Image (spheres, rainbow, N blue to C red):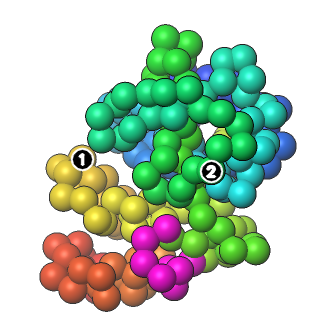
Amino acid sequence: MQSEALSAVRALFDNYPARYWIAGGWALDLFADRVRRPHSDVDVLVLARDLHHVAATFTAPRPTLENPNTGDQRPWEPGETLTPGPDVLAFPDELFPAPVRIMLAASDGDDWVYHRGRGTTRKPLDEITLTNGLPYLAPEIVLVYKSRSDRPKDTEDFHDVADLLDPARRAWLHAHIAPRYPDHPWLPTLS
């Protein structure tokens, strides 16, 4: 799948020495092997424990810390403690075909850990990593993030890829949405 925005991210992360994943709607496009809808940005997930690699790799320009609710940005100082989930790093929008945002993931050893809850939603890093020209998050991981929202694009994303999920991915996603949101509208489709 060709995309000017994804090509820019590939070039940006060419010298990044740690794991990273295309996340969000673009990850679902990579999984579906087609562009399903327009995207306003490219989300890239990195492990919070690898922030020193982010600081060492991205020096000019250095990403800023962005408030995901307001879009306000302030300088990010390497070594500053950031929290998986609410903290987002952003590159200057004018440098890329689409804004590039770095989200942070919690981890425990070789496991990705969902930052919400008690650390019980987790999966081995090797299992959450798929590739289609770029490393991207497995769809069940993207969808567990999206399940907490009722934004129309998240519901559209779910319905666009639900039929592509194999039984193991469906079961994992169901098992990790149902306890938190027992009346979630996606559960019947996943059953």
Residue in the foreground of this view, choosing between 85 and 138: 85
Place residue 17 in its image quadrant.
top right
Q: Residue 96: where, in percent of width, then height?
A: 54, 17
Residue extent of the magenta highlight: 115-122
Residue 174 drawn above or below residue 112: below
Q: Is residue 84 visible?
A: yes
- Indicate yes or no whether the magenta region holds residue 117: yes
From the image, which quarter does the N terminus lie in?
Answer: top right
5 within the magenta span: no
Crowd around label 1: few <14 · some 14–19 · many ≥20 (10 Å): few
Residue shown at the point (27%, 53%) measured from the top left: 154
Above or below, comparing residue 143 to residue 63 in the picture: below
Residue 2 in sight from this viewpoint: no
**Above or below — where is 172 with respect to 146?**
below
- Label 1 SS: helix
Q: Give the main secondary structure, helix, strand or loop, of the magenta stretch.
A: loop
Horizontal arrangement in the rendering, residue 133 relative to residue 164 (left or right): right
Of residues 118 and 75, the one nearer the viewer is: 75
> Eyeballing the image, is 123 above or below 74?
below
Residue depicted at 76% across the width and 74% down the height: 109
- Circle 1 residue: 153
| Secondary structure under the numbered disc 2 in the rendered image | loop
Q: CA distance from mark 2 to mark 1?
A: 31 Å
Q: Nearer the viewer, mark 2 or mark 1?
A: 2
